[in-house]
Amino acid sequence: MPKSEAQKKKDKRARAKKRRLKKKLEGSAEKAQELQGRADAEGVSLSTIRSRDRRAVIKEERDDPEGLSAAKADAEEKRTAHKILFIQGMTQGATVKAGIAASGVTRSTLYEWRDTDPVFAEAWREAKSDIRDALEAEAYRRAVHGDDVPVYYRGEEIGAVRKFSDTLLIFLLKAHDPARFRDNISVEQSGPGGKPIEHTVFEGKSEDQLQKMVRDLVNEAESIVQKGSAEVGADTGADS
C-alpha cells in the first residue's frame, strides 16, 4: 500500500534525525576514550568517573544558574559516550552483559536510556541484528566448511582431519525451511482393527442397570479366560 505524503514526510524527518544523532554519536567517540583514560589513570571504574562528573554538574548548576545549558549539554555528551561504549562492547562480546561491562553504566540505566532515546534503541536493535548475523555465519562455517582438527601419534602432530557439525546443519535447515525440516510428531489413537474408539455412556443409567452392566462385563471376562485356558490345555494334549 503506497505511503501518504504525511507519512513520507514523517519518515524523512525520522531519517534526518537518525543521521544527526549518528553523527553526534560518532563525534563523541573521543570523549568516550577520554573517560576511559581517566578511569584507567585513577584506577577507578567508569561509573565512579560518571558519578563525579554528575556531582560537578549539579554543583555548577547551583553556583552558576546561567551555565545550566552548557552543563546539560556536557552531561548529554557524556551519556552519548557511554552509549557508544555499550554498543561497541555488546557487538564485540555478543551479549548485553559485555556491553554493560564496557560502558561502565548499570543495566537499569541503559534500559532507561533505550526506552527514552529512539536513536539509541535503534542502534541497540541493529547491534543485536549484527550479532545474530555473525552467529549464523559462524554456524554455517562450522556446518558446511568445518574445522581442521590436528591428529597426534605418540605425542607428535602427524596431520589433521576436517570435522563438520551435523547438529548445526540441522538447526540451519530448520531455521531456513521449517515447513520441510521441522520435527513432525503425530499421535493417533484407535480401537481394535483401526476402528474408532467406542465409548460406553453411563450417564442416565439407573443403579440396577449399572450393576447389570458390571455383571455382564465380569461374565464376559471370565468367559474369555476360560476359553483361553481350554485352548492352552488342548494344545498341551496335542503336543504330548
Image (spheres, grey):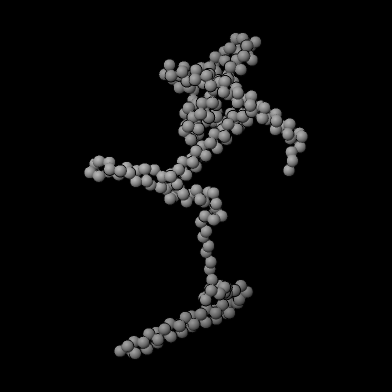
Most distant residue in the right direction: 5
Above or below, comparing residue 196 to residue 164 in the picture: below
In the picture, the quarter occupied by the C terminus is bottom left
Q: Residue at x 56, y 33 (%)?
A: 124
Q: Residue at x 77, y 34 (%)?
A: 5
Q: Nearer the viewer, residue 158 or 127?
A: 158
Q: Nearer the viewer, residue 38 or 28?
A: 28
Q: Position of residue 123 (x, y in %)?
A: 58, 31
Q: Residue at x 52, y 58 (%)?
A: 184
Which image quarter: residue 57?
Answer: top right
In the picture, the quarter occupied by the N terminus is top right
Q: Position of residue 60 (x, y in %)?
A: 58, 12
- Report the side of 155 relative to 84 (left or right): left
Q: Position of residue 108 (x, y in %)?
A: 54, 30
Can residue 79 be seen from the camera position used here?
no
- Report the side of 182 relative to 145 (left or right): right
Most distant residue in the left direction: 154
Q: Position of residue 143 (x, y in %)?
A: 44, 46
Above or below, comparing residue 187 to residue 163 in the picture: below
